Image (cartoon, helix red, strand yellow):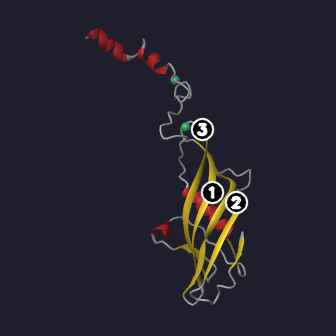
Amino acid sequence: MKFDISSLRQSPGKTLPFDFTEDLRVDEDSTMSHQIVGETRFHGQIHATGRGDELVLNGTVEGTIRSECTRCLAPVERNWTVPVQVSFSADRTAFVAEDEAKTTDYPDYPIRGSLVDLGAVGRDALLLAVPMQLLCRPDCAGYCPTCGQNLNDGTCNCEDVDDGGESPFDILKTLL
Ligand SMILES: [Zn+2]
Ligand SMILES: [Zn+2]
């Protein structure tokens, strides 16, 4: 979504609200594990500070991320609400306003003419906010490393096999 900020330029103190809902999904052939699905809502406001040469965006992204469970690879789809704060500066680069966030790899957002790409800002904020490791449920049991059984579907017999026969502990048992 391209947003026209021309009325903010050279207008210190002025604030423009924005609110849009758009399909922000990345290309289908993207290799990213997290995919945006459905419509994403991005709303908030852009405020002109300084002499009107810096724009500060405060907003909220509400969207759905589809990924797979880190433990069992089951599909995981979850809604996320993410606060966003970025600045567009007059030198056509952007930075995150919060100091600690500047250490992250936050991308720069250019001002093209009098337009900023709020779709890119919202997409990045949503994808960056979601942890890389997602679980289908907090107590996901994952797969058995030995036989590959999905332990959410039921237990396997691997522990029984380990206990029977060849274990060195069996020798201890006989010695005792
Ligand atoms: Zn899982
Ligand atoms: Zn097993």
Residue at (33%, 12%) from the top-left corner? 171
The percent coordinates of residue 18 (x first, y second) are 65, 73
- CB of mark 3 near ligand 1 (< 8 Å): yes
The residues tagged by marks 3 and 1 sit, at their Cα atoms, a distance apart of 21 Å
The residues tagged by marks 2 and 3 sit, at their Cα atoms, a distance apart of 24 Å
Q: Which comes before the other along the chain, label 3 or label 1?
A: 1
Residue at (57%, 41%) from the top-left corner? 69
Instruction: Judge depth for marks 1 and 2 and give the one in front.
Output: 1
Q: Is residue 72 above or below residue 96?
A: above
Q: Which comes before the other along the chain, label 1 or label 2?
A: 2
Please indicate, yes or no, whether residue 63 appears anywhere in the rendered image.
yes
The percent coordinates of residue 172 (x first, y second) are 30, 14
Q: Amino acid at mark 1?
A: Gly
Residue at (60%, 85%) from the top-left corner? 14
User: Which residue is disc 2 drawn over?
Assistant: 24
The residues tagged by marks 1 and 2 sit, at their Cα atoms, a distance apart of 9 Å
Instruction: Judge depth for marks 3 and 1 and give the one in front.
Output: 1
Q: Which comes before the other along the chain, label 2 or label 3?
A: 2
The disc at residue 51 is none
User: Which residue is disc 3 drawn over?
Assistant: 73
User: Which residue is disc 1 drawn over?
Assistant: 63
Q: Is residue 57 above or below residue 163?
A: below
Q: Nearer the viewer, residue 8 or 74?
A: 8
The percent coordinates of residue 160 (x first, y second) are 45, 17
The answer to whether the residues at label 1 and label 2 have Cβ atoms under 8 Å apart is yes
- CB of mark 2 near ligand 1 (< 8 Å): no
Q: Amino acid at mark 2?
A: Leu
Q: Quadrant of residue 52?
A: bottom right
